[in-house]
Amino acid sequence: MNQPETPEQPPSPVRPGRAPVDPERWPDVVRLPSASRPRTAVARLLVGQALRRLPLTVRLAGGGRLGRGGPLLDVHRPEAFHRRIGAGGLVGFGESYMAGEWDAPDLAAALTVLADNAATLVPAGLQHLRRAWALKQPGARRNTPSGARDNISHHYDLSNDLFALFLDETLSYSSAVFEELPATWPALAAAQGRKIDRLLDLARVGEGTRLLEIGTGWGELALRAARRGARVTSLTLSAEQRALALERIAAEGLGDRVEVRLCDYREATGTYDAVVSVEMIEAVGEEFWPVYFRTLDARLAPGGRVALQAITMPHDRLLASRRTYTWIQKYIFPGGLLLSTEAITGTARAHTRLRVTGRDCYGPHYAETLRLWRERFAARAAEADALGFDETFRRMWTFYLAYSEAGFRSGYLDVQQILLEREDG
């Protein structure tokens, strides 16, 4: 006979020194989830087995200690920590951090250990239990034309001022390409320019090029292309980003060379000598990958080139995780899904005349980019608070940046600049 679900509990107690969590803004953080005692017990068992084998130092409140030594992870409320993982797996793990139930002095280092061992955290004989914690994708997050607008707005329309707190003066929100690693903050702006120039060179953008950009950001790529003499049509779904991009374009007197449209990539018209897109394909969603690549093909003039910058993951991990609902999707990028190299080449081949003809990988550079952003964001926490981003948001954002950095440091994630050309030339 199944153990009945435990009733919903009162809000998780606030640790000394932490502000109360806003229950309207963070309902799944302020309250502990309902979870059966067996699920919580199994989570405690699996988490304990995993952590004992890892090069971590895990201190449990009450005196317990796990791990083989390494970056410190302090679990202040073990019962709540295990209960959240029992109810929601990795989503619960992230929410537990947001709730202040665990901390790590070097969060990125601790998460890198977990990312290094992601495929083996659950023993082979118990892999079937992963399905018990795999939350299903909510249908409301599909990247239909209207859904994509909502999903993009959720992240990119938070506040231009928020992003300006931790980005460099180019306002580039994607991996930089540094001359040397480890990187320093003063080198970031030049490294962002280097990344854009490499992509524009890959697409052969120059004087007179008709360029389509899918995903405007805050306009840096469009500006650099226009300075080369290109005529740029840039598409975005973010009203906040478009407004600031237009201000920057006007300030440089390049309004006659750059048009920024508030529209979906599926609504694009015309033909172009080159199409570029920087880390936008991750927001398309598997259901719409064929549509995205067919759009690239349809918009490209004969002899044209497509240059993409894309975050990728191993194909076996994509196949294993593509149907699950992750913490990143719930809190940061709703509707998002990373591709693998095989997914990119296979989708292009199956649905278009486009073929991948070149790839360059920069994973370690993204790890350094994210570290610099994370350190900058931490240093300006008081300014984020003054903008209305409370402590729970700041913990969420810190976890997001560190979690992403860990993915690249471990090699679990990569970032690539990819060239596609038509097979028939």
Image (cartoon, rainbow, N blue to C red):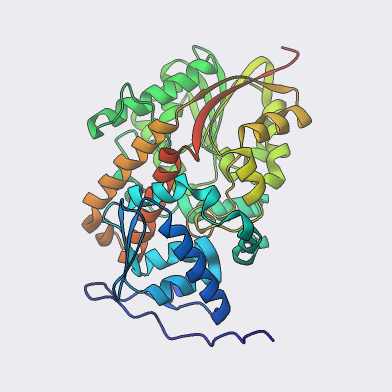
Give the residue at x 39% y 43%. 405
Q: Nearer the viewer, residue 336 or 3?
A: 3
Of the 4 image quadrants, the one containing the C terminus is top right
Examine the rendering and report whether any part of residue 284 can be seen: no
| Residue 39, percent from left and from top | 57, 75
Give the residue at x 46% y 42%. 242
Left or right: where 204 falls relative to 405: right
| Residue 31, percent from left and from top | 44, 78
User: Is the residue 210 above or below the residue 237 in the image?
Assistant: above
- Say which quarter of the image contains residue 26: bottom left
Give the residue at x 50% y 69%. 45
Examine the rendering and report whether any part of residue 295 can be seen: yes
Q: Nearer the viewer, residue 169 or 342?
A: 342
| Residue 51, percent from left and from top | 42, 59
User: Is the residue 283 above or below the residue 190 in the image?
Assistant: below
| Residue 310, percent from left and from top | 54, 34
Q: Nearer the viewer, residue 314 or 385?
A: 314
User: Is the residue 92 above or below the residue 108 in the image?
Assistant: below
Give the residue at x 66% y 54%. 323
Number of numbered labels in the structure image? 0
| Outermost residue, right side | 350
Of the 4 image quadrants, the one containing the N terminus is bottom right
Left or right: where 237 falls relative to 362: right
